[in-house]
Amino acid sequence: MNTQLAPRPGRHDHPPQPVPHPEPRPVRRVGPLDRAAMHLGMALIAWGRRPVRTPRRERPVFSPESVQARRDLENARDQYLVLKLTQFR
């Protein structure tokens, strides 16, 4: 079981072999119009991702009846606390 086989020369499926191109392609240079389009695209992306400001909501206006009811409730609570605190003296 120590027999080692040498691979056959030529194209193998595994690993894939790169196929050489008959003639190399010329390198395409980036022109000023391409650069301007790239910068415009990046600016649009940055502008689209800007934080959105939510409009401030105005504070709710309470009716005079609810304001008076709140004052009455606070006065009643203060009177109750005064009575409870004087019990422990």
Image (cartoon, rainbow, N blue to C red):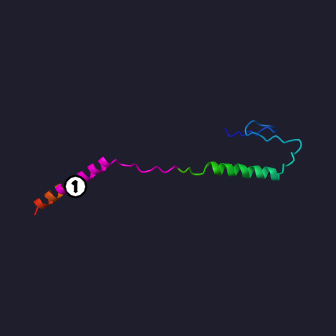
Within the image, what quadrant is residue 4 found in? top right
The residue sitting at 51% across, 49% down in the picture is: 55
Nearer the observer, 20 or 10: 20
Nearer the observer, 15 or 60: 60
SS category of the residue bearing label 1: helix
Q: Residue furthest right?
A: 23
Part of the protein shown in magenta: 54-79
The residue sitting at 15% across, 60% down in the picture is: 85
The residue sitting at 46% across, 49% down in the picture is: 57
Q: What residue sits right under mark 1 in the picture?
A: 75
Quadrant location of the C terminus in the rendered image = bottom left
67 is within the stretch colored magenta: yes
Is residue 24 left or right of 49 when viewed as pictured?
A: right
Q: Position of residue 35 (x, y in %)?
A: 78, 52
Nearer the observer, 78 or 41: 78
Is residue 80 left or right of 48 when viewed as pictured?
A: left
Q: Position of residue 50 (x, y in %)?
A: 60, 51
Amino acid tagged 1? Asn
Is residue 79 left or right of 69 when viewed as pictured?
A: left
Quadrant location of the N terminus in the rendered image = top right
Q: Position of residue 33 (x, y in %)?
A: 81, 50
The residue sitting at 64% across, 51% down in the picture is: 47
30 is within the stretch colored magenta: no
Nearer the observer, 43 or 52: 52
